[in-house]
Amino acid sequence: MKFSLAAARNAIQVGDFQTALLHFYPILHWISSVERRKYLKEFGDTLRGFLCDERNDDESKLAMLAMSRELFADEPLLLNIAAEFLFRSGRYLEAFDLARRASASENREERLHALVNRENIKSNIMDQWHWAMLNDASRNGAYENAMRLALGERLGARVLDIGAGTAFLSLIARRFSPKVYCCEVDERISQLAERIAIGSGVHIIHKHSTDVSTEDLDSQKVDVIITETMDSGLLGEGIILALLDAHRRLLSSESSIIIPNSLVQATVYACLIECQAITDEHVAVVKGRRFVSPYVLIGSEARLTKGCEPYWCCYANELKGGFRYLSGSVPVFNVNFEDASRLENISNGVHEEHAVELHQQGRVHAIMVWFRCSLFPGLPALSSSVEANNCWQQAIYPVEEPFAVVPGDHCILAVDAYRDRLFCEILRYSFGAENTWMDEEVDSLPLEKMRFDSASRSLKGNAENSTHEHAQCSHEQSGQNGKRSLDDRDKRADSFGSYVLVTGDSSADVEMEEVDEPTEGGRENEIMETANILHETDFLFLNDSALVSFFARCLSALVQPGTTFERGDVSLVDITGVASVSGSLASYNENYYCLCYYRSDDYRMLIEAFQTTGRCVLRAFDGSQGFPCAGDVLFCWPITSSGTLCEHSLSRIVEWKLRNPSGIVIPSCVRIRAQLLSCLKIVRRSKPQRSAHQGVDLSAIDELALTYYYDIEPSTLSYEKLSEPFDLLTLRFDSELPSEAGVLPNFLQQLDTRSQVLTCSSGLADGLLYWFELTYGNEKYSTQSDETAARCAMYLFDESRAVNRGDRVAFMCSLFHANLIVELER
């Protein structure tokens, strides 16, 4: 075979990257290293194409990687390519090691590329939940005390740690036992356990506990089992089946010990809470059609099947607006982990019903669940309640249709437990015949007007009314009273209000006038359909009235007298992915017409719901077809509600501007703002806190500490401000695209922008809270505002640093393919 660069390039043209590499290798091998570097980028692009080609098997890909390393040893470009391939292959630790080495590069772009890869890999190995758990001193101390009591007088006891994770508890057990085994099925975490436990005498078994045999345990059963496979709802990590199997196969005798040792049973509690933020994140109503997240409207049979999450998890006291208890906490489920018969019952499925009495007036938005579990007799129990303030979040079951209650009302909760599934729902509730007041009236009505003879009704099927036409559940009311079956549906008048877009001659501001529709004659009665489940929708943005108002004001400013579009003759294109933007604007203004491009079928369903009968003003297209299209104005939304930039959206702006160079993009600018702060809570969820580790050395995973933490609700975050807000970066969409080949616009890539802040107080600085301000003209939407639904993020220093009032702290900020990279300058 005759090798040549021409043949390699011809193969690249037809997508035959393997043949191209076979030509490259011998040629590059025989030329000098200096000459070889001229072909580095071309070779790297070819290698990347080969590794991404699914027709090639992993063995061939690994062989090609090894050969490339012979040609370009420790070359950052190839290290990054290899790291991305290993990451896609699930070999996370190897990928992380390569990305870490590439991040030492002097080539700025490759270093930034490596930093992005490194953060992505880190968050997939050790997320914030793992760090919160490892840094929970109360949890760790409780397990150490339980092991001391259980093993102190059982010399030579053999121990198995089930679901061991990083082997943290196994290393504590090793202090009290000469024979400690730990099993972990997650390959990423078990590899970490190998690194952490090296030389400790702990035996790591890379298996699920139900696949562990006595041969794995040196042909003997164990005397003590330790496990911390308890999630927010107690059962979600598989503790029931794991311990049932251990009872049958792995425990040496009836006198063997299990930690948690629940002679006082592990108990799950449930309560009803008021929390509008939960509904905003999971439910939307569009013109009588209800849309919900997968956590809301799934029957118990479906929720108890594998692969379906039965509940949503969060720190309830960190949600916007907080929450209120409307009832006391009622025990709804319990289990003794040493009782094999109880474990077997749960593995076959159990059903219970429990009554809950309401003690506060308000609106029920969710069931909140938490557990209490004793690790060993005589020791304080662990709890996942809000008040416990530890690593566990709370399990949340959002209510499909929030309803108003007063003290003395009752609800019946149905609880189903099956294997690793725990499902709670409100089966029915009872209250008096006049309890239909709306949530705006909760605080104004005297209590005596809310009491009446009780009537029982089912939760499902009571269609509620929204006072706004765009998607939201912020203002809903309960329906008629009376006893109903689970399958009934109410006929309701469509009482959605509407808004008119007012564009006066003297003002560029938009006024949102609420217009009440007539209660008789002018409104159709509808039957509320079964709720539609949306799997890929950001409900926070969908329900964000501030976001819709932002675009309405921008559009109003665009069509003011004296502007290019004063006659309202404007061609609009919407790629926001938020259906309530164009859906609501079309409802506000009968002249509104827009082409909407989407990535998810969820969007198409929502747009169909927004369409007014007989008047189709919104045309929705699959984003992969027909884009970019011609247009005067592009609506985009290049951020996520969790606090990140959206590369896909930013790339679509480039495509559209290439076709419409004079087109207007709304918003026209994104400013990334930041504030220096001290926040121990976020630090504990992001990086190792040695004081909490009970003397266990976890330094082997120090490099996996998180640098960025997302989904922060600033209004409920406890932190100390150490500076005033300042600018980190600015992304502009109103500038011309660069004409030079290979140069990206500044909203996709910026390198080394320096910023500096003056501290306003002394303290221990942990990092930067940062957020986005999206603007067009004088209009602004800020993700830090209490009026918006979006959340913020935090950049954390490698090490917290003490600052004094008046100190100057400098940062280097970059944007690499829409990824924000912040570095503290020393």
Image: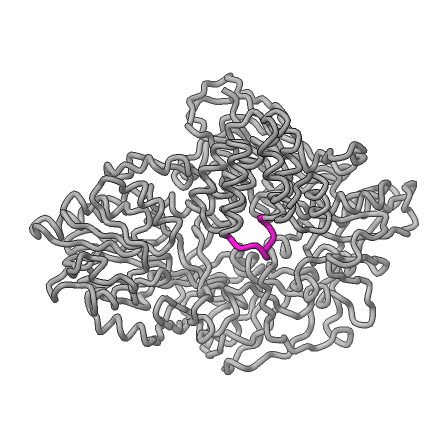
Q: Is residue 6 above or below residue 210?
A: above
Identify which residue, 73 or 371, lies in the foreground.
73
Q: Residue at x 16, y 50 (%)?
A: 179
Relative to residue 312, is residue 416 drawn left or right?
A: left
Q: Residue at x 54, y 82 (%)?
A: 487
Relative to residue 97, is residue 78 drawn left or right?
A: right
Does the magenta portion include 52? Answer: yes
Relative to residue 644, is residue 709 drawn left or right?
A: left
Does the magenta portion include 755? Answer: no
Dividing the picture into quadrants, the one containing residue 242 is: bottom left
Relative to residue 669, is residue 121 drawn left or right?
A: left
Q: Is residue 46 above or below residue 803?
A: below
Q: Residue at x 69, y 71 (%)?
A: 494
Identify which residue, 92 or 798, lies in the foreground.
92
Dividing the picture into quadrants, the one containing residue 665 is: top right
Stretch of the chain drawn in magenta: 51-58
Q: Residue furthest front?
A: 1
Q: From where the camera sits, is residue 430 visible?
A: no
Identify which residue, 380 or 155, lies in the foreground.
155
Identify which residue, 490 or 32, lies in the foreground.
32
Tally the numbered discs: 0
Q: Is residue 4 above or below residue 351?
A: above
Q: Is residue 427 above or below residue 34?
A: below
Majority SS type along the magenta span: loop
Q: Residue at x 13, y 63 (%)?
A: 252
Indicate the position of residue 558 as horizontal and vertical percent values. Answer: 84, 44
Indicate the position of residue 654 as horizontal and vertical percent values. Answer: 76, 43
Indicate the position of residue 705 as horizontal and vertical percent values. Answer: 42, 37
